Image: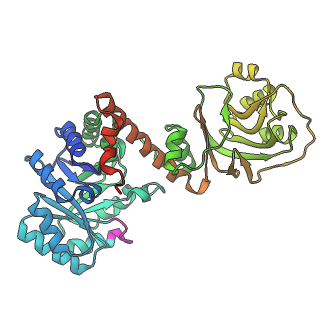
């Protein structure tokens, strides 16, 4: 049986960092890719440098060519690439020109099926045009919305007789799945390049591919909400804020009990200052794992205390966020339950019953609707619109992995500015 090949996608901006990661992982990797961001940042010099550093590895130049097929293939070939990746969505004339150039310069052509519309039929057309390998690729932005490369792969395998590569947010479990499903080349980027131990990550992925199965990873059949919450539990509120471009953070809302985290869907409550009837009624309406979010309109009188907290625990409500005050904090801290609030006061209001449950509210300066996702930890609380929750959760996980890698480089002796090459990227007047 032919060994499945592992391709390392170096989608970084700096050649030296890319080569350093490739050196850490080279014993487990068969193919090294100069990713499109790297080529756009450093030009063909990046391909030349990688070729020189790894003379015994196959080198891919991910050009994502959509026009001028011949000249871009020539550029990559003369820079040392063994495989040149172009876009399968390019016009047939561009594909044909690229094929002629590839034959002339002795390189192989990989066509990326990213955004081709009908990847299965296009894969067959590309085979007929002379492409050597098609890449089933779910792009980063598509991954964030829940698209799955495995579903496309299973159809392409039955359609073409050329090599098939697969890319798109794969971890070791997904890599094993696509290898078992018929992929010849498994392309991994961020799962390795953003790891704090790139060598160990590559070793795990190599092992999973060779075994063709893995015991862990995303469970197929999970609902989108379950997958979203699982991801949100793995990241911090700063990670999420970064993923949302500094949006979503509630102002002035802090944890009453530190060291706790919540991640769940909101059930909203609008009530008058100190009126605790609707907040308490919301407990009975909440589902297991929900987060009750209350706009109380005052930090001087509490709509929440120990007894409401105990009721939430009994109902397995994930937590409570209050734009207002809370009391009985000594007892709440003994219960060690995640309550986030604007203030602490001793006095409570009356259960008058004014207000509504399930309406759009403002909490900590952020609009919250029932069904939006709420994440809280010691750094504060963020709200994620339900329409983009899975996407934001995926992007936050990428932020988290990037920070792991940066932290590892700092621990090895670099400063933060050196890792990020801030001086290089500063705007110059």
Residue 127 placement, left or right of 178: left
Q: Quadrant of residue 342?
A: top right
Q: Give the range drawn in magenta.
A: 114-120
Compared to residue 60, the image places residue 230 above or below, namely above
Identify the residue at horizontal 15%, vertical 63% (top origin): 76
Closest to the observer: 223 or 271? 271
Q: Residue at x 39, y 56 (%)?
A: 140
Residue at figure coordinates x 76%, y 51% from the top left: 358
- Return the residue found at the far bottom: 93
- The image position of residue 301, as x and y in percent, is 85, 33
Which of the 4 image quadrants contains residue 91?
bottom left
Q: Is residue 412 magenta?
A: no
Q: Is residue 358 left or right of residue 210?
A: right
Query: Looking at the image, is 123 positioned above or below residue 32?
Result: below
Q: Which residue is nearer to you in this view: 97 or 226?
A: 97
Q: Looking at the picture, does residue 243 appear above or below residue 325?
A: below
Colour convention of the picture: rainbow
Name the residue at the front extreme: 429
- Looking at the picture, how far across and down is residue 429, in whole percent? 35, 57
Magenta span has 117? yes
Q: In this view, does 243 lie above or below 281?
A: below
């Amino acid at each position: 049986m032919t060994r499945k090949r592992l391709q390392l996608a170096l989608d970084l901006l700096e050649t030296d960092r890319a080569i350093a990661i490739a050196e850490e992982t080279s014993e487990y990797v068969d193919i090294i890719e100069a990713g499109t961001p790297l080529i756009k940042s450093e030009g063909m010099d990046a391909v030349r440098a990688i070729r020189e550093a790894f003379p015994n590895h196959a080198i891919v130049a991910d050009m994502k060519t959509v026009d001028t097929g011949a000249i871009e293939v020539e550029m990559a070939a003369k820079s040392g690439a063994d495989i040149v990746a172009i876009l399968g969505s390019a016009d047939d004339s561009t594909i044909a020109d690229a094929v002629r150039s590839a034959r002339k310069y002795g390189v192989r052509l990989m066509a990326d099926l990213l955004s081709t519309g009908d990847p299965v039929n296009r894969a067959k057309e590309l085979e007929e045009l002379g492409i050597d390998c098609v890449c089933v690729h779910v792009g980063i932005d598509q991954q964030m919305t829940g698209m799955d490369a495995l579903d496309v792969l299973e159809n392409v395998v039955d359609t073409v007789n050329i090599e098939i590569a697969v890319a798109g947010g794969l971890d070791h479990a997904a890599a094993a799945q696509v290898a078992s499903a018929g992929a010849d080349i498994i392309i991994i980027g961020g799962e390795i390049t953003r790891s704090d131990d790139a060598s160990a990550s590559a070793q795990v992925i190599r092992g999973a591919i060779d075994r063709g199965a893995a015991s862990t990873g995303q469970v197929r059949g999970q609902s989108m909400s379950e997958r979203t919450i699982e991801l949100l539990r793995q990241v911090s509120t700063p990670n999420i804020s970064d993923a949302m471009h500094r949006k979503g953070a509630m102002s002035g809302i802090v944890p009453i009990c530190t060291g706790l985290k919540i991640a769940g869907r909101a059930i909203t409550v609008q009530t008058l200052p100190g009126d605790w009837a609707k907040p308490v009624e919301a407990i009975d309406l909440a589902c297991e794992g929900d987060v009750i979010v209350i706009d109380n309109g005052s930090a001087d009188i509490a709509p929440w205390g120990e007894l409401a907290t105990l009721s939430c625990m009994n109902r397995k409500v994930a937590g409570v966020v209050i734009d207002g005050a809370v009391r009985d904090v000594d007892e709440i801290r003994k219960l060690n339950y995640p309550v986030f609030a604007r203030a602490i006061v001793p006095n409570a209001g009356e259960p008058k019953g004014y207000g509504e449950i399930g309406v759009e509210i403002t909490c900590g300066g952020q609009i919250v609707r029932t069904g939006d996702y709420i994440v809280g930890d010691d750094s504060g609380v963020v709200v994620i619109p339900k329409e983009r929750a899975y996407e934001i959760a995926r992007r936050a996980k990428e932020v988290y992995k990037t920070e792991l890698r940066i932290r590892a480089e700092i621990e090895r002796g670099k400063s933060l500015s050196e890792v990020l090459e801030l001086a290089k990227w500063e705007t110059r007047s």
